[in-house]
Image (spheres, grey):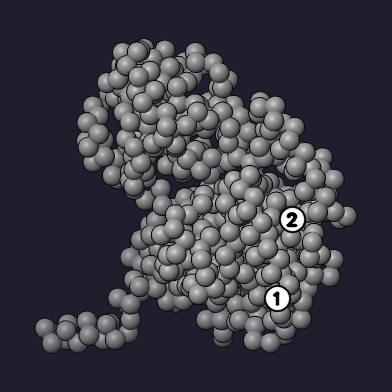
Amino acid sequence: MAGYVFLGNSTKPTEKEAKSRDVIKLDNVSRPCLQAAINLGYEVYLGVNREKAFELRCDELPVKLYDSHTYRSITAFQDNWIAYRNLCEIIKKHDVKVIHCNSPVGGMIGRLAGRKCRVKKVIYTAHGFHFYKGAPFINRTLYKWAEQLMAHWTDVIITINKEDYEAAKKFRMKKGGKVYLVHGVGIDTSQYSSIGDQRAKKRGELQLRNDDVAVISMGDLIERKNYSMAIQAIAKARNKNLQYFICGDGPEKNSLQALAESFNISDQIHFLGYRPDIKELLAASDIFLFTTKQEGLARSMMEAMASGLPCVVSRIRGNTDLIENTNGGFLCDAADVSDYAEKLNMLAADPGLRKEMGESNLLTILKFSTGAVTDEIYRLYNAELARGGVIFNAYIKTLTENIPLRAKKRMESGIPLNAFVLVSAGDLNKNKNNQIVISAIERLNKENVYYVLCGTGEKEKELKKQVQNAGLQEQVRFLGYQNDIKEIYETADCFIMTSFREGLPRSTMEAMAMGLPCIVSRIRGNADLIDDGRGGFLCGSDAVEEYVNAIRRLYCDRELCRRMGEYNRRKIKKFDIENVKKEISEIYRTV
């Protein structure tokens, strides 16, 4: 079996951390790439900064571990030599055909080793080039030259913002090399949408008054984050209702506290240190302020957007990928304190504008969700690792033997393995209202969303005409009545029912028992089965936009799909036949 290696870099661990035997936990950077490589039939190796890493376990995915020894210092020559030697050893021992390396040090080690050992495919993810616009001279020369040199030995460069994407396209890469733009590393948006009800409690803990406007920032207190500009903006705003909360710690804390005192606004600037309750603090806040000088694609800003906050941020790379000026917030000149102060006062005075911009961000951030990014990585891997003959016997065997039922049914139906599949079951009649789903898919304009209808009826001809007029013949499949409905559900990602009237629909209960999230009409019966926001979404029977938004949420966040499906699987046990028998018996005994 051909080998695949994934490596990045991190701060150098302490002796205790390096010797730790704790189970290895994956993050959003590595998880989708590792899963994609496993799906393609590779033997997967993950680099971690632990001694005797081969003895450690990773319970999430079947990966093997090795000590990558990759730290964040480009001048740590001995450590970098050890990292290079360790990687070369793995490559030679395990027939490694693909390396995916990340960040400057990991990227350097991975590409040098790939060149030395003639690895067939080398992928590099840049999490923010150091030669950004406005960078110091050394960044725009030495670091840029280094990236240009390494590009000669790179097959794929993945970037996470437009500025880096345009810069990378100018590099001279290996023959046939390609540059991609993906939406970051993914953020689990559902974690932030479920805590809004804690706003009042947290505001009470922070001793905020009703007319206070809470402004929040998160990140290390270092020069690059430019907190001094944020404090000056609060002072310039001359608005006593602004209360600014800074979450983080670092070497600039004392000087920032002194700056706040010099402006006589210490009562408005609150240094909270590192906080485990960031989600709750975001829920309690009204505005996100981010005056940073340099970012790749800031996670703190994405967290604020996922919490429905308007953003006042510097007009720099990364920030401009997340919001447009006046749409979701304001982009300010990085060194213009008056610009920040003006925008803060504008939002502080207008709750309606804050709400409008926050709602815009809730939609925008879906493109950066874990599910959306995972889908992008899967597509990229399928495209790149199938090019140039990098398809191996193990993968071919996977396609012909022991194929999981889900994949087999999709292949039989001609539905892509990475598609998002909606399913409904029942007569195609006026009551079932299936045309709403077709209209929603048309408005979504997503080639990767498929809809499978199981059943026949008086509306079938009309529905097929609607599909033809919308040009959705490939995406909407009419299967007729199916005896293997459980296998059809196994193929799907989500159950959808848009009926006008139901008692307690069996098809919805079957879908719940199969662990599917459910998008259903807000009617009697459905409302008894599906808890809105927990097991799926309840929508108005004729509310096309509600269905569009619900489908988009699940399409962009496969982790949310999984959690909702698991919730339904637990809830449906109340409707198990044995429980119903007991209830009926109890009624009869009472009578």
Q: Residues within 10 Å of mark 2 (few under 14, many from 20)?
A: many
- Percent x, y for residue 117? 78, 65
The quarter of the picture where residue 482 lies is bottom right
Q: Which amino acid, by three-letter code, is at mark 1? A: Lys
Instruction: Say which of 420 and 465 sits in front.
Output: 420
Secondary structure at numbered mark 1: helix
Secondary structure at numbered mark 2: helix
- Percent x, y for residue 391? 78, 73
Are circles 2 and 1 on residues that touch, CB within 8 Å?
Answer: no
Q: Residues within 10 Å of mark 1 (few under 14, many from 20)?
A: few
Question: Which mark is on residue 93?
Answer: 1
Instruction: Say which of 459 and 302 sits in front.
Output: 302
- Percent x, y for residue 443? 63, 49
Q: Residue at x 48, y 73 (%)?
A: 57
Furthest-right residue in this view: 175
Earlier residue among tags 2 and 1: 1
Quarter of the image with the N terminus is: bottom right
- Percent x, y for residue 342? 47, 15
Q: Is residue 248 above or below residue 404?
A: above
Q: Which amino acid, by three-letter code, is at mark 2? A: Arg
Q: Residue at x 34, y 37 (%)?
A: 273
Instruction: Say which of 111 and 306 sits in front.
Output: 111
Q: Residue at x 34, y 71 (%)?
A: 571
Instruction: Say which of 202 and 31 sits in front.
Output: 31
Identify the residue position indicated by label 2 in the image. Answer: 111
Q: CA distance from mark 2 to mark 1?
A: 18 Å
Q: Is residue 39 above or below residue 100?
A: below
Is residue 413 at all visible to an observer of this figure? Answer: no
The quarter of the picture where residue 372 lies is bottom right
Q: Residue at x 64, y 45 (%)?
A: 74
The quarter of the picture where residue 448 lies is bottom right
Is residue 576 at all visible to an observer of this figure? Answer: yes
